Structures are given as structure tokens and as C-alpha cells.
């Protein structure tokens, strides 16, 4: 009899004024992680909580691919409801503690309605995030920000690329902490390490595969 392998379930929510992709990821155990919780509007926040509760999920990690405000609007919601602080690469600690607050004030003034939880520990490249019967490898991919990461699950061949790599595009390098040369090195590393069949789930836009991006994305040619 063929062995039935555990499978990830992935739910994407396209949220907030920036149309950011929040990903809820879980397996048959019910343990889950949320990657880049950008839910902003009350209806989005209610929908996220409903999805977690309706699927009887136990949230065990709140992960950030990088410290930009549109990827973390909902972290207070998860802290208040589950007691979990966000996890982020250590190279983005300054952005998290200073730039995010400044940028939110620039965009929303005194009208921003939520608190901004910060990590109590930081990630490094090579760390492993465990949940249920699965693991996500932390791949440090600086360029969009100093601490940008990709979360990669080898057994399922899926990668959550944040704003490092999009379908047919890449993240900007003209924002605080961006570096075009570092991004190019990160893209070369990803395209050489990840199998072509790897499905990528970016922080904005639609999913793709590494093979398709290597063949068609002008930034990877």
C-alpha cells in the first residue's frame, strides 16, 4: 500500500490597502502558522479569526517575511487572541522597532487603530520553524530589506517568498534598508537552491513556480 504523505493546507487572504497576501498554513494535526498577517479592515480581521476557529486550528507561530507595515497590521490581533508575538529575522530588528512606527505615522497619522507587537526573539537563516508534521526552513534573502526571508518547506516543495520574489517581478530596493546588489544575490541563491517544481507564494500577487520564474521573470534571466 502506498504511504499517504501529510499535506499542507494553504489559505491566502488578499488584504489591506496594499493588497498584501496573508497566508494561513496548516496540516492534518491542526497546528498552524500565519505568515505576514496584514489584515487591516475589521471584516478581514473577523474573517481570519473565523477561518482559524472554523478549521479548529491551533496557531503556534506568527511569522514575518520582513518588517514592512503592510505585512504586519494584524499582529496585534493574533497577540490578543493567541498570545503569540511575531517572529522575524534579526537583521530587520531596527526596521521593526523604528521604521515601521515612523512609516505608519506617515501614512495614518494619529488615526492608526492598532498596537504594533514586536518580537521577543529573532530568527536567523538556517533556523527551522516546526508545526504539526511539517517544518519551514528560514532562508535569509536580503535585498528588499536587510532581514527579508523565504520560508521553505522541502517535503511539500512550497516557498513563501514575501517581497523577495513575485510572479514575474521582485520586491523594490528603493525603500528603507533596500539593496539591489543584495537582492540579485538572493535571487541567484533561490533559483539555484529551490527545485523548479517549487510553488512560490509571494507577499503580493498570484502564486507561481521557481521553474516558471527562471524561464520568464526578467529579473531572474
Image (cartoon, rainbow, N blue to C red):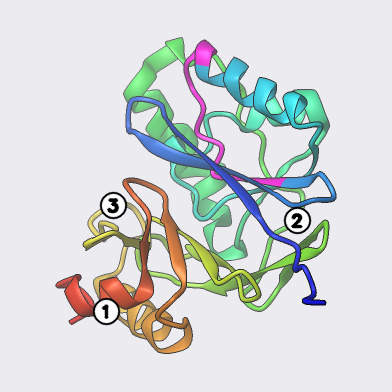
The residue singled out by tag 3 in the image is: 175
Whether residue 116 can be seen here? yes
Q: Which of 121 and 215 is in front in this view?
A: 215
Question: Helix, strand or loop at disc 2?
Answer: loop
**How many neighbours does mark 3 have within 10 angstroms: few (below 14), some (14-19), or many (20 or more)?**
few
Q: What is the quadrant of residue 188 in the picture?
A: bottom left
Mark sitting on residue 121: 2
Question: Helix, strand or loop at disc 3?
Answer: loop
Q: Give the range drawn in magenta.
A: 33-43
Q: Is residue 147 above or below residue 139?
A: above
Q: Is residue 96 above or below residue 5?
A: above
Q: Which residue is drawn at 51% across and 27% down?
A: 39
Is residue 50 shown left or right of residue 14? Answer: right
Q: Nearer the viewer, residue 126 or 69?
A: 126
Q: Quadrant of the N terminus?
A: bottom right
Q: Which of 112 and 52 is in front in this view?
A: 52
Q: Residue at x 33, y 77 (%)?
A: 211
Which of the two discs, 3 and 2, labels the residue nearer the N terminus? 2
Residue 61 at x, y percent in the picture: 74, 48
Is residue 9 on the magenta stretch? no
Mark sitting on residue 214: 1
Amino acid at each position: 500500500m502506498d504511504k499517504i504523505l501529510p499535506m499542507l493546507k494553504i489559505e491566502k487572504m488578499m488584504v489591506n490597502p496594499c493588497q498584501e497576501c496573508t497566508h494561513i498554513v496548516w496540516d492534518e494535526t491542526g497546528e498552524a502558522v500565519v505568515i505576514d498577517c496584514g489584515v487591516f479592515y475589521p471584516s478581514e480581521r473577523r474573517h481570519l479569526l473565523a477561518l482559524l476557529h472554523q478549521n479548529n486550528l491551533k496557531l503556534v507561530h506568527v511569522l514575518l517575511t520582513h518588517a514592512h507595515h503592510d505585512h504586519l497590521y494584524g499582529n496585534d490581533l493574533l497577540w490578543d487572541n493567541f498570545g503569540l508575538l511575531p517572529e522575524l529575522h534579526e537583521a530587520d530588528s531596527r526596521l521593526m522597532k523604528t521604521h515601521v512606527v515612523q512609516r505608519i505615522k506617515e501614512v495614518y497619522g494619529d488615526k492608526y487603530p492598532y498596537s504594533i507587537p514586536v518580537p521577543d526573539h529573532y530568527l536567523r537563516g538556517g533556523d527551522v520553524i516546526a508545526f504539526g508534521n511539517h517544518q519551514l526552513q528560514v532562508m535569509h534573502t536580503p535585498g528588499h530589506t536587510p532581514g527579508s526571508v523565504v520560508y521553505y518547506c522541502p517535503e511539500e516543495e512550497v516557498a513563501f517568498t514575501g517581497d523577495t520574489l513575485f510572479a514575474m517581478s521582485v520586491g523594490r530596493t528603493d525603500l528603507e534598508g533596500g539593496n539591489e546588489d543584495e537582492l540579485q544575490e538572493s535571487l541567484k541563491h533561490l533559483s539555484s537552491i529551490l527545485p523548479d517544481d517549487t510553488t512560490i507564494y509571494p507577499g503580493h500577487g498570484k502564486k507561481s513556480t521557481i521553474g516558471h520564474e527562471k524561464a520568464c521573470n526578467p529579473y531572474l534571466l
